[in-house]
Amino acid sequence: MSKRVVLEASHAVAEAVKMADVDLIAAYPITPQTHIPERLAEMVADGDLDAAYVPVESEHSAMSAVLGAAAVGARSFTTTAGQGLELMHEAVYVASSHRYPIVMAVCNRALSSPISIWCDHSDIMSCRDTSWIQVFCLNNQESFDMTIWAFRVAEDPDVMFPIMVNLDGFTLSHVTEPLELPDQADVDKYIPKYNYRLALKPEAPSSHGCFGLPEIYTEVKLAQEFALRASRPIIDKGWEEMSAMFGRSYKAIETYKGEGAKTLVVTMGSLGETAKMVVDQKREQGEAVGHLNIRLWRPFPFADFRDAVKGVETLVVLDRAISFGGPGGPVASELRSALYDVENKPKIVGFIGGLGGREIDAETFAYMIDRGNEIAKSGSDYLYEPILVRGLDTGTGVRG
Amino acid sequence: MAPEFVKVGKYNIDAKEYLAEGHTFCTGCGEALAIRLVCKALGENTIISMATGCDEVCSSPLPVTSWRLPWMHTLFENASAGVSGMEAGLKAMMRKGKVPERDIKFVAMGGDGGTSDIGLQSLSGALERGHDFLYVCWDNEAYMNTGIQRSSATPYGAATTTAPAGKLSMGQNTQKKNMVEICAAHDIPYVATACPSYPFDLMNKIKKGSEVKGPAYVHVLTPCPTGWRTPSNFTIEIGKLAVETGIFPLYEIENGHYRFTVTPNTLKPVEQYLKAQGRFRHLSPGEIAKIQKHVDEGYATLKAKMAAFPAA
């Protein structure tokens, strides 16, 4: 029997890592990720989790240590945030290039400078092209579910890619709320035993991480690209199995009250919960508004997204990162690109907000939806409109 | 009781070659020779984590590899963090019964740049955490793989492409970083210097370092004909001269106790070592005298340590 518990989201992740029976955790403390490694270290210290806990001296070494552990076939976990993700950046690429099924929880945090420990998505956007599978969570239940799902999918022989589970720093990582914890036996059934075929072992020596000359580099990278895209059916299968076993269903692109919606407000991460609340209010007022949640950021679910926005007139997209000097918020740009060749496509109105922990409340979402509908009708020569900026008039945007 | 240490020698040497022929190391490379000997001393129950450098580039051009031992390369500065994960991860799996219990030697390898510059933090972390592993540094005294740029291991007076000798410069104007003492300061059970010109001394130190429980560090001077500007058939000789002049003494520190493993009767003048190499050819007699003084002082300090903390 599953049990209902009350846990902080960070502790829900730690619980999932424990139930996945990892062999090694390597982590370096950084706010707002600290509650995850602290809880795991405690579990190891109490004998509740039989794993090596390697208290490394940097995030670069955290990722490097899990690379080593993954190379010998150990089920490995690490976790970081913001600057830590930036420091380990080059090793992040190696994890996916070596096809090691590492799971990493990222408590999304703004980037320096000025130094900020609070949430936005600047850190994860720098990892967009690292060839990791990347998902976002909205609440504590999802933080647990996505973490066990990550082990199930990453280690599938038809996937063998690392997975980042993203939790908004503080606004999700530090939130305490009820969730269902499944039985250990069910988790054991859900995540099969892992046996890495190419593990480094003396009886069958293999070389990991060779030198790639121009004659072969392209082929290696293209193989990786094809493999990442081909992982999609298993990504979905992982969620289908979760639905069958635990009764909770997830999809790459999820819509809320999307039926008949003329406007969809698009978010990625925990702000989706606030957005849904505003959608309820708008529906009560008779407005044809829905919500679209991007759960799977990489590999990007193009077909699912195009299906989900059929018949929609306006997409109001909230980005939590700036693409400096670029085409607009990274999510909005991605969606524009996804729809470029589609006929009768919705208009995309981009907003940027929630940077460095700036709050976005229900009222702000209501404003964005109204303003988005207005811009969709009147047109705009702005790339995007930043919201709630001191010294900037409402309705002023950034030009290309 | 710990098993008795069985020495490598003329009649006790692994005949297997773990570094396969076909690699792309330069002719006369001291590092390739050292790797070959070191792997023989380690034997087949070994897993290697290697830093970026000549050693990795020359041994693993896809789609082929020279490695007959399980081997991983990821990045430049993280060989020690990588081996930490291998050791801790595999031991956890053994404890949990996921893989059979066995004695595996976990070894990290890197060049002088990958060890004393960019990889120093990762190495220090792994030594401090007490992982059961051996770190082997191939010291050819500059970034040879990228074209002879200076590192913190480049000796005083050597000309490199980023510390060239010129009208206003005599080349490297800093003293070589003392990696042996830095590692020994981590209070690890075994630290040693070695050189492939003394093959059995090298192999026995590797064997000892890999068999000791806890971290061990062996610093191997690997002459580089390309960067030192020496003839390719002079590698063994120049390594010997480094030892015979006292520039690179061969010794070990076991649990804090010092011991010379090769003891020249009298030290040769450093001039013999310096004059044999193109990288030092610009040095004036005054600069050579300065280097001689520094070597004499260093050797005296080392002898004082031998006397103060002698091996049993």
Image (cartoon, coloured by chain):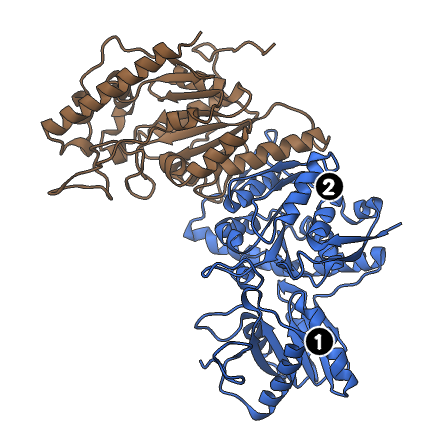
Chain colours: A blue, B brown
Q: Which mark is residue A10?
A: none
Point out which mark residue A21 bears. 2
Residue shown at the point (71%, 50%) measured from the top left: A11
Q: Nearer the viewer, residue B225 or A384?
A: A384
Going 34% across and 12% down the picture, which residue do you hit? B262
Quarter of the picture holding the C terminus of chain A: bottom left
Q: Residue at x 66, y 53 (%)?
A: A159
Left or right of B174 on screen, residue B208: right
Q: Amino acid at mark 1?
A: His
Looking at the image, the residue that sits furthest to the bottom is A378
Residue that appears at 42% across and 34% down: B110
Q: Residues within 10 Å of mark 1 (few under 14, many from 20)?
A: many
Mark 1 belongs to chain: A
Secondary structure of residue under mark 1:
strand
Question: Which of these two is toward me, A322 or A330?
Answer: A322
The answer for which chain carries disc 2 is A
Q: Amino acid at mark 2?
A: Asp
**Quadrant in the picture for residue A238:** bottom right
Q: Is residue A92 left or right of residue A212?
A: right
Q: Nearer the viewer, residue B67 or B50?
A: B50
Residues A79 and A205: in front is A79
Residue A328 image offset from top left, x and y in percent:
51, 75
- Find residue A377 and report its image quarter: bottom right
Label 1: which residue? A291
Q: What percent of the width, then of the height, locates residue A388?
A: 55, 77
Closer to the N terminus: mark 1 or mark 2? 2
The picture places residue A24, in percent across and down from the top left corner, at 64, 39
